[in-house]
């Protein structure tokens, strides 16, 4: 009986290990696939001409994605400038001020916010934010600022939940020590709690960035997708993800390879961001 | 997008149903192959027609390839394909049978509130090449023009580049959308927008401009007086054989033409 149970244990363990490793396999396969598809163009056109080239006309032999790299970072930082203060304040409120009952409403609401499909955000952006920007700031409304606003809302759940966790993990004794010294609640928060949770909060911002830079559907719908680097917040722009999704339908030959090289650049950027975020989280613990 | 997915699912389900019903039957004889090559703008439409044709006539395989109009004409002259596809008229010396499948008309559209009703082809070219950036230069408000083009690789963009831009590059500051539908949506909501869409999709929400004095209508396109249009041609070297003729008949049939009309093209027998 005992022997049979241990065999069963062994089988379960092997099966679960296989499944766990298969996720790693998928990551590996995706990486290999994109690399195989995209690298021939890097060899043919040259890394410099792709990453630093400013002209994207794939059917005419120009594959420069520099404006898109800049645009991707611009919307991402725009989203962070709007989303980070909002998200952090929300996390502080949730962990330090809100009562149990309010927390019970706010937390699930935030999870719901994370679960809304991005096409819905894009649609809301087109219907409400784009005309608002057009009427009050000028331009067509399909712009850097509209995209940043929508992305800011989309990254809020990421920023809030990870900052919240890291603020909650600050030991209670730190707070009690601060109160014992005669500090007020707010002084305790911004002198003790937030600095102690600093690395986790930074990690939440970086993961938020990762989400913003990888967002596609909502961005295509409201960014305007012009190829030029935007010169003002009301100018349209095209991101790396947008470029791939926009042109995939009809792309053949080198054009298709060009889109895969765009994918490689995107993959490298997102991996770098994740690595930095993980580094931040590890340092905390 | 939703429409594309819808069509995709439809075709998938049709293939599925087809393969189920066909299982018991024995395939009688070899399959007849019809090879077609040429213009990449015509290709997606012929591919779609071929899919329907093959479902209705299981004994045929229609092989559709791109390569461009000139390559299609050459292949047809060399008899390497049964039919060529072209989105330009034949030049002298290219002696082939022309079958007009349909016409592809592109209308330049603006918001209905825009007071401008007419532009010249040159003005349109100047707008999309970034030379004219303000509506004031065209006699309206002092306001930036929000021009919208289609994405690289799109057939509509290809036609627009050939017929309007004529070698001049579309400026990088022009907005890009990935379907006729989203171009139309922006033009319908932004009073200062201008874009181009297939004639078949123009309705009350947008205003189609008169270009060089000719309004885009089905009749002005068929007579050729509206210039931003081109015929989609199938070409054959000499008289097509019976198999090929069967496909051509399907393309020109009511069902075939209806499929093309749904894609925003103008049928040749309207």
Image (spheres, rainbow, N blue to C red):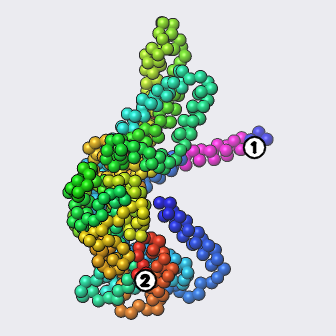
Q: In this picture, which residue range is highlighted in magenta?
A: A6-22
Q: Considering depth in this image, is B224 or A84 the residue closer to the camera?
A: B224
* Residue at horizontal 46 percent and vertical 92 percent from the top: B242
Q: Residues within 10 Å of mark 2 (few under 14, many from 20)?
A: few
Residue indicated by mark 2: B269
- Quadrant in the rendering for residue B78: bottom left
Q: Main secondary structure of the magenta part?
A: helix
* Residue at horizontal 45 percent and vertical 50 percent from the top: A217
- Quadrant in the rendering for residue B154: bottom left
Say which chain tag 1 marks: A
Q: Marks 2/1: CA distance?
A: 78 Å
Q: Considering depth in this image, is A227 or A162 the residue closer to the camera?
A: A227
Q: Considering depth in this image, is A99 or A140 the residue closer to the camera?
A: A140
| Quarter that holds the C terminus of chain B | bottom left
Q: Are marks 2 and 1 on the same chain?
A: no
Q: Is residue B248 magenta?
A: no
Residue indicated by mark 1: A4
Q: Considering depth in this image, is A10 or A70 the residue closer to the camera?
A: A70
- Residue A122: image location, x then y, percent: 45, 48
- Residue B80: image location, x then y, percent: 36, 84
Callout 1: SS: helix
- The answer to whether one can see residue A132 in this image is yes
Q: Is residue B129 above or below residue A15?
A: below
Q: Is residue B199 above or below residue B100?
A: above
């Amino acid at each position: 009986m005992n022997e049979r149970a241990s065999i069963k244990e062994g089988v379960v363990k092997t099966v679960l290990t296989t499944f766990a490793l298969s996720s790693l396999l998928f990551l590996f396969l995706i990486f290999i696939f994109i690399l195989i598809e995209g690298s021939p163009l890097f060899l043919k056109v040259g890394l410099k001409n792709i990453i630093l080239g400013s002209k994207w006309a794939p059917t005419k032999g120009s594959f420069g994605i520099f404006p898109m790299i800049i645009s991707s970072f611009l919307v991402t930082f725009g989203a962070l400038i709007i989303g980070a203060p909002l998200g952090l304040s929300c996390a502080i409120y949730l962990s330090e001020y809100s009562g149990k009952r309010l927390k019970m409403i706010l937390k699930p609401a935030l999870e719901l916010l994370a679960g809304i499909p991005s096409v819905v955000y894009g649609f809301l952006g087109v219907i409400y934010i784009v005309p608002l920007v057009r009427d009050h700031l000028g331009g067509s409304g399909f712009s850097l600022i509209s995209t940043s606003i929508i992305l800011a809302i989309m990254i809020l759940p990421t920023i809030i939940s990870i900052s919240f966790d890291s603020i909650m993990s600050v030991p209670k004794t730190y707070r009690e020590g601060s109160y014992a010294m005669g500090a007020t609640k707010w002084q305790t928060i911004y002198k003790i709690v937030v600095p102690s949770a600093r690395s986790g909060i930074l990690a939440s911002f970086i993961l938020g960035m990762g989400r913003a830079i990888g967002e596609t559907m909502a961005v295509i719908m409201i960014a305007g997708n012009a190829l030029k680097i935007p010169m003002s917040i009301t100018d349209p722009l095209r991101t790396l993800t947008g470029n791939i999704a926009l042109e995939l339908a009809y792309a053949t030959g080198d054009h298709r390879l060009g889109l895969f090289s765009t994918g490689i650049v995107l993959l490298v950027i997102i991996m770098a961001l994740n690595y930095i975020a993980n580094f931040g989280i590890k340092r905390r613990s | 997008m939703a429409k594309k997915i819808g069509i995709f699912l439809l075709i998938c389900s049709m293939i599925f149903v087809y393969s189920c019903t066909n299982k018991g039957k024995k395939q009688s004889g070899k399959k007849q192959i019809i090879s077609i090559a040429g213009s990449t703008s015509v290709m997606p439409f012929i591919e779609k027609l071929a899919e329907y044709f093959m479902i209705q006539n299981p004994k045929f395989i229609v092989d559709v390839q791109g390569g461009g109009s000139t390559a299609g004409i050459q292949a047809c002259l060399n008899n390497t394909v049964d039919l060529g596809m072209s989105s330009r008229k034949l030049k002298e010396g290219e002696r082939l049978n022309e079958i007009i499948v349909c016409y592809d008309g592109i209308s330049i559209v603006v918001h209905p509130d825009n007071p401008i009703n007419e532009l010249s082809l040159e003005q349109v070219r100047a707008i999309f090449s970034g030379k004219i950036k303000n509506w004031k230069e065209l006699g309206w408000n002092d306001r930036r023009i929000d021009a919208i083009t289609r994405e690289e690789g799109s057939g509509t963009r290809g036609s627009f580049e050939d017929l309007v831009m004529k070698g001049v590059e579309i400026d990088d500051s022009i907005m890009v959308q990935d379907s006729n539908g989203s171009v139309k949506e922006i033009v319908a909501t932004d009073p200062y927008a201008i874009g181009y869409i297939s004639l078949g999709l123009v309705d009350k929400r947008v205003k189609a401009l008169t270009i060089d004095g000719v309004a885009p209508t089905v009749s002005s396109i068929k007579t050729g007086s509206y210039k931003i249009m081109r015929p989609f041609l199938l070409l054959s070297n000499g008289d097509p054989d019976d198999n090929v003729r069967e496909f051509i008949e399907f393309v020109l049939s009511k069902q075939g033409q209806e499929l093309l009309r749904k894609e925003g093209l103008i049928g040749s027998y309207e």
